Every structure is written in structure tokens, then in C-alpha cells.
Amino acid sequence: MPSSLPCRLILLLLPCLMFLSSCSATNHMLKARPVRLSGFFENRSKAIDTKGKLPFQTVWTTADSNVLREGNAAKKIYIAPVSLAYLRVPKKAVTRQELRWGLQRQEQWMAWKLREEFAAAFRESPRPRYQLVKAPGNDTLTLKLAITELNPTSPNGNAALTLMKVAVTPAASLARWFTSGNMAIEGKVITPNGSRVFFQFADNEADKLTFFNARDFLPYGHAEQSMRDWATQFEQMTRREAGLELKDSSAVTLKLH
């Protein structure tokens, strides 16, 4: 039987965390709410809320049969450099204070990383539907991505909350709302001729709920995990007609890193 208070608290919370991570309805309730769509997302009035049924919160697919035919006939995909033109200013007071204290927002690096993660998902897929290429072409879809929100996790705030969890009560976890970060992206797939939108999506992810995780002390640790999840999920969506079951990422994690 563990003698330390932290171990006892972890054992106490473990069944609850396991239940939360396995229940899709609860997972949807705990997930970050969708953010306002930017001007990058075309046909915003026709966007559909997936209500947790797909990995992305908001999607739109063209109803034009010619565009659908052209998009479905493509065999390759090109991932364009990620746009930061629609990135909003940080919205949380704790985040703004961290930035004033010297925390770097690193939006350029995050844009590069997001593109790399999506490319890696296709390179490493066991049976990709589309061949990843380095330039647009006649039989190539173009995936355009934009980061619309990028609020880093507060390492200092989470360090203080971790002490509160251990010394006071696990209820201190509720204060994570003030110290957690979030990242929101939008994406659109363009037909090979480069002029018509085939498919669009948008999603917002916040730090995962956990008792303790090393990513809580890294400004973009949770965001990096979200980027990997988005990339994997998008690549899997391109193979959905093959019977692949798609799941949204969990709002809870039991991992320590």
C-alpha cells in the first residue's frame, strides 16, 4: 500500500480518469468548445457541427458533383505551408502574463511543426490513399492549413497547481482552466486545378485532463500532441470508405508524458 499522499491520491482518482477516458459522451462534454471560424474557412454558414462523431468539430464537404468527382479521382496530395494570417491574439490573462514574462509564442515553429506532422502521417501510413508529393500537380490535391488560436500552457501556473493538488486537494485540478493552453486549426482541401474547395475542417483542442503530466510544464507540450492527433486523424479520414473506424482524441490522458 503506497504510503505517500500523492500515490494515494493517484489511486483514488485513477478509476474516475479511466471512466472519463472511455466514455465517448463524457469525452465530448470535456473537450474544448469549437472556436469562431476565421475568414480562412470558406462557406462558413454551411459548416456542420459533428458533435463528437468525427475527429474534427466542424466540417464542410462540397455538394458539387463535378468537384467531388475531381477530388476523388486524385491520387496524390501536397501539403502547403501553414498560414498564420488568421492567428488571433492570446485571450487568457495568465497566458498574456506569461508572454510578458518572456515566454515565446513560437508561432513560426508551430506552423512548421504542424505541416511536418501532417506530412509524416502520410509518409508513415501503412496504406495511404494519397501519395505525398512536394509540389502541386494535375492529379494532386492541395491541403491548406491555418492556425487560428495558439495559447501556450502556463508552466508556472501548473507548477503551483501541482503543489496544491498534493498538499491541499485534487479539486485544485478545476483551476486548470486558467492555466491550460489551447490550439485551434482550420484546413481545406483544394482540387487539382487549384481553384475549388473539396473539403474543409476545423478543430480546437485544449490541454488534456490529468492528475500529473510532464506536458503540463511545457508551453506547447499538449499542442504538439494535438498536432500529431490531427495529422493521424486526417490521414485516416481519407481512408474512411475502406471501413476504418474513426474516433476523436480523448480529453483525458493517463500518461505521464
Image: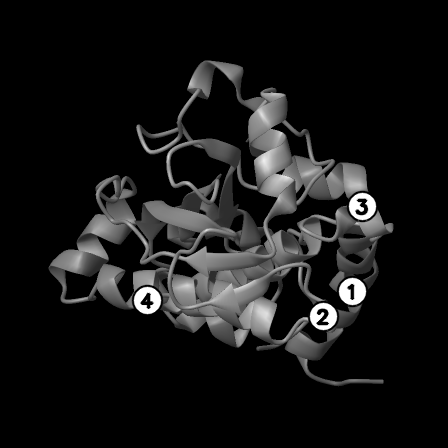
Callout 3, which amino acid?
Glu
Q: Are marks 1 and 3 in contact (CB under 8 Å)?
A: no
Q: Is residue 40 above or below residue 80?
A: above
Mark 4 or mark 1: whose residue is earlier in sequence: 1
Q: Are marks 4 and 2 in contact (CB under 8 Å)?
A: no
Q: Nearer the viewer, mark 4 or mark 2?
A: 4
Which numbered marker is on residue 139? none
Callout 2, which amino acid?
Ile
Q: Nearer the viewer, mark 2 or mark 3?
A: 3
| Disc 2 crowd, CA 10 A, few/some/many (<14, 14-19, 20+) | some
Give the secondary structure at mark 1.
Answer: helix
Callout 4, which amino acid?
Trp
| Relative image position of residue 168 (x, y in whole percent) | 55, 61
Which numbered marker is on residue 14? 1
Which numbered marker is on residue 112? 4
How far is the residue under mark 2 from the one under mark 3? 41 Å
How far is the residue under mark 4 from the one under mark 2? 37 Å
Mark 1 or mark 3: whose residue is earlier in sequence: 1
Which residue sits at x=41%, y=72%? 217
Mark 2 or mark 3: whose residue is earlier in sequence: 2
| Relative image position of residue 162 (x, y in whole percent) | 49, 67
Q: Nearer the viewer, mark 4 or mark 1?
A: 4
Q: Are marks 4 and 3 in contact (CB under 8 Å)?
A: no
